[in-house]
Amino acid sequence: MTHLALGAMGGTIAMSTSVPGQGATVALTGADLVAATPGLAEVADVSAEQLTNVPSASLTLEDVLRVHAWADAQVRDGADGVVLTHGTDTLEETAYLLDLLWAHDTPLVVTGAMRSAAMAGAEGPANLLAAAVTAGSPDARGLGVLVCLNDTVHLAARVTKTSSTALETFESPGTGPVGVIVEERFWPSWSPFERHPALAAPPSGRVAVPLIESPFDDDGSVLQAVLGTGVRGIVVAGTGVGHVSEPAAELVSQAVADGVTVVVASRTLRGGTTTRLYGFPGSEQDLIARGALMAGRLSARKARLLLHVLLASGAGADTITEEIAARGR
């Protein structure tokens, strides 16, 4: 039988409440989740381990690096697949960070739930079962880190949370899911045209790349304040295909001149950034001329993690440019 390693990290899937009307809190362990999932024993032999047990908004880079080391060890010890249970608030970020570092063909699948165990229609057990099916499927090998909820499977590099409450919250705008679960089987929808090599894990610590949104009537004051902190990299969630105001554009020039790597993403859900559609001050073409990098289809949240990993590993300017261009396609 397929052997899967389950790492429990907390989140709504592990939450419950004993008092009606009281807010849910973390209450269930990985072993509890396994015991509460009908049919899981028929799908795989699952070994559960508690890695963290917190809401995902409280997870840190150090937590995720520790989870990566644990998952890597499970595969080296013979696991056929790895499943992580995780809160949905920051699930896409943890999944993408792990994807950047994941060097195995063995599937690593991240799942969670939108309803706590105390709610009617709690979908945690169904999501865990579907994730186990995916992690044990030969068709999932070589796809990198996957996200599986609501019987839908997504690439970590493309998935995002689109609703704060809906069960079908996780989507991959522009590409769609990479597969679905039907009758306890993973059915691939398409295959990625390439799988990028794993990057070296960064040192533990904080993610040292701030993320700034470019809002209406932006005078650049927030960007100016951030530049004063001595950061080495900044990600800007720009409007449209990667635009900022003219005052902010002037500060991008200042940042690049000071040796700060500036990556501009789109704050929109689909489409990403372009390189030559517009030429006005603050446009994508103008920002590129000032030395900024465009994130392509990477969201600002994911571009932030990629830039941090690259900077922390000591990557030079040429490598950073190449990696962001390749992974943003």
Image: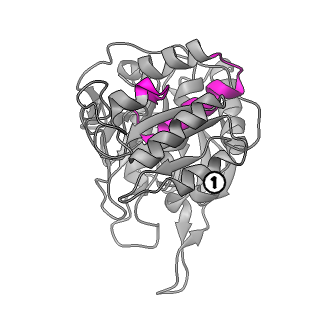
In this image, 184 relative to 44: left or right? left
Q: Count neighbours of disc 1 (C-alpha within 10 A) and say few if under 14, some if 14 to 19, many if 20 or more.
A: few
Residue located 37% across and 63% down the image? 164
Q: Residue 55: image x %, image y %?
A: 59, 61
Q: Nearer the viewer, residue 319 or 151?
A: 319
Q: Residue 251: image x %, image y %?
A: 53, 42
Q: Which residues are magenta?
A: 288-316
In this image, 260 relative to 23: left or right? right
252 over 315 or under it: above or below: below
269 over 233 or under it: above or below: below
Residue located 33% across and 18% down the image? 192
Q: Total of numbered circles in the picture?
A: 1
User: Quarter of the image holding residue 153?
Assistant: top left
Q: Nearer the viewer, residue 197 or 269?
A: 269
Magenta includes 70? no
Pointer 1 residue: 225
